[in-house]
Image (tube, rainbow, N blue to C red):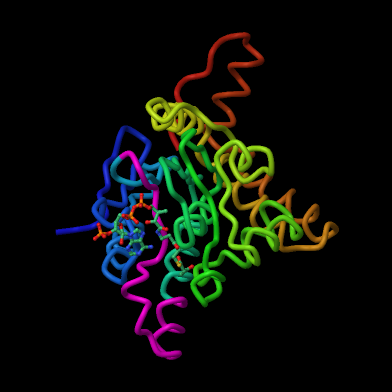
Amino acid sequence: MSFVNYEQKDFVGVITIDREKALNALNPEVLADLEAVVDAIDADKTRCVVITGAGQKAFVAGADIGAMSTMTPDEGRAFSAKGNAVFRKIEKLPMPVIAAVNGFALGGGCELSLSCDIRIAADNAVFGQPEAGLGITPGFGGTQRLARTIGVGKAKEMIYAARNIKAEEALRVGLVNAVYPAEQMLEEAMKLAERIAGNAPIAVRQCKKAINMGLQMDIDSAVAFEPELFAACCGTADQKNAMTAFCEKRKHEPFIN
Ligand code: CAA
């Protein structure tokens, strides 16, 4: 039995963390199942991925506290490294990834959402890094990605004070892109995924690469890098299709690449 389900809906892949009884908490088995699912994504037919949690209550309520409670320093290092490796794989998927946050996104759950490109939240979502209140640091990238996403001051406040924030505040500080009533949220996340999947796949992937890699460069290197990605799109069938259609004042054919 796997704790992580995968469903392919046309060009959109939907990953569901499914350990509902423990609010989808990430123990080593769940992390291994998540990695296997991510590794198996067919990049040729998947233009966008949505990650969500099973049930109404939680996206992921964190790394498994029971599993961590007896960890030695070496075991803790290995667990943190494993979670970081899996989340980095998600971040480095060539296609965009949307976190559809259907409830608690605490600790490892907040960190999982941060490894995605975009976060869409249900109005009952709660985000936070409660680790300092448990005697540990965030271990799956939270100290790094939260500051990069919402700014250093706000991230430090949330992490040092172990203060959770509700969906509306998450929207205000830029942690999430949009908030919807809980019963509608997944549908809205899917609509966004389908819209992304309807655009030219090579172009979308080059956009992801440009933004993610560019953010790690100084601005001169980053703007020198952009023309390479632009060039890689020129001459593709999708570019010819879309631009010829524009010039001929008609709708383009569906994108193929
Ligand atoms: N680890 C293990 N089990 C968890 C869990 C977690 N992170 N979160 C919830 N559960 C389990 C509970 O133990 C409970 O199990 P039982 O029914 O067997 O008792 C079940 O899920 C339901 O949880 P609650 O009864 O606690 O539900 P609630 O509605 O009263 O509270 C909650 C919900 C506020 C999310 C609460 O469960 C909670 O505070 N969970 C822990 C959140 C947390 O601290 N997460 C961060 C973990 S540290 C981390 O993630 C480190 C890292 O970066 C690697």
| Image quadrant occupied by the N terminus | bottom left
Residue pictured at 41% horizontal, 25% vertical? 184
Q: Quadrant of residue 158?
A: bottom right
| Image quadrant occupied by the C terminus | top left
Residue pictured at 67% horizontal, 43% vertical? 174
Q: Nearer the viewer, residue 247 or 92?
A: 92
Asked whether, in this view, residue 197 is left or right of residue 206, the answer is: left
- Give the image quadrant in which the ligand numbered 1 is located: bottom left
The residue sitting at the left extreme is 1
Asked whether, in this view, residue 196 is left or right of residue 184, the answer is: right
Residue 174 drawn above or below residue 17: above
Residue 97 drawn above or below residue 181: below
Q: Position of residue 221 (x, y in %)?
A: 80, 61
Q: Is residue 70 magenta?
A: yes
Q: Is residue 237 magenta?
A: no
Q: Nearer the viewer, residue 206 or 65?
A: 65
Q: Nearer the viewer, residue 58 or 147?
A: 58
Span colored in magenta: 56-81
Q: Position of residue 228 (x, y in %)?
A: 70, 52
